[in-house]
Image (cartoon, rainbow, N blue to C red):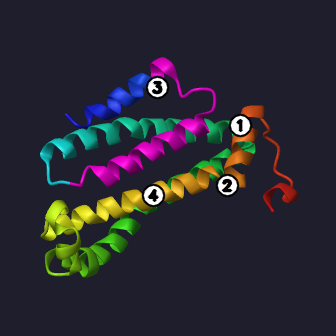
Amino acid sequence: VISCGFIVGGLYISKYGLGRNPLVAMFIANIIIWIISAVFTIQPSIVLLSVGMFIYISVVPFIEAAEQTILQKVVPHERQGRVFGFAQSIEQSASPLTTFLIGPIAETFFIPFMTTGAGVGLIGSWFGTGMDRGIALVFTVTGIIGLILTIFAMNTKYYKLLSNRYMHGASEPLPEAELA
């Protein structure tokens, strides 16, 4: 049932599109995903989990469609194969890398923090305690960090440069002065 969210998101995009600037749609979708990641684990609730995951999965097509749309318009045609290949390599390596990084962090910090550590006294009364709440705290903290980084990225000169290049259709290579 939750995977139907992917279809819902895709149908919405096929009917209404991504808007004038897909980069804005991508950042809004990322903000929604990070908020969901931070909030759906606040309480141990199957309803929060189900609704949160449905919304999360519904938003993923916006990010994927926006990424492809932006890359196809901004990257010069003769470089698209290399850029798409590199982007795909990064995306495919992200999942196992984060799993290998987060697993030990959760096991050595977050789970003990929420089972016998200071987290029990600090937030245990409203967040809950135990191993499952340690994992939940990983999602909450990751969501908050992701939200902060996304908002930061939206305010960089590179966001403005990419947005401007998308809107005005510039496809020639960037001069070194623009990258500095």
Which residue occupies 68% across, 36% down? 73
Measure the C-alpha gap from mark 2 to mark 4.
15 Å
Return the residue at label 1.
166
User: In the rendered structure, which amino acid carries the disc numbered 4?
Assistant: Gly
Q: Secondary structure at mark 4?
A: helix
In the rendering, which numbered label is found on residue 102? Answer: none
Q: Quick one: 85 or 24, which is closer to the camera?
A: 24
CA gap between label 4 and label 3 equals 24 Å
- Left or right of 48? Residue 30 is right
Query: Can you give x and y, in whole percent of width and height, for residue 85 in the image?
Result: 57, 52
The earlier-in-sequence mark between 4 and 3 is 3
Which numbered marker is on residue 156?
A: 2
Considering only vertical position in the picture, is 50 above or below 39?
A: above
Work out whether mark 3 precedes mark 1 in sequence or the reverse, and give the earlier one: 3
Is the C-beta separation of discs 3 and 1 under 8 Å? no
Q: Is residue 107 left or right of residue 81?
A: left
> For the image shown, how many numbered marks are present on the structure?
4
Residue 13's tag is: 3
Q: Position of residue 170 (x, y in %)?
A: 80, 38
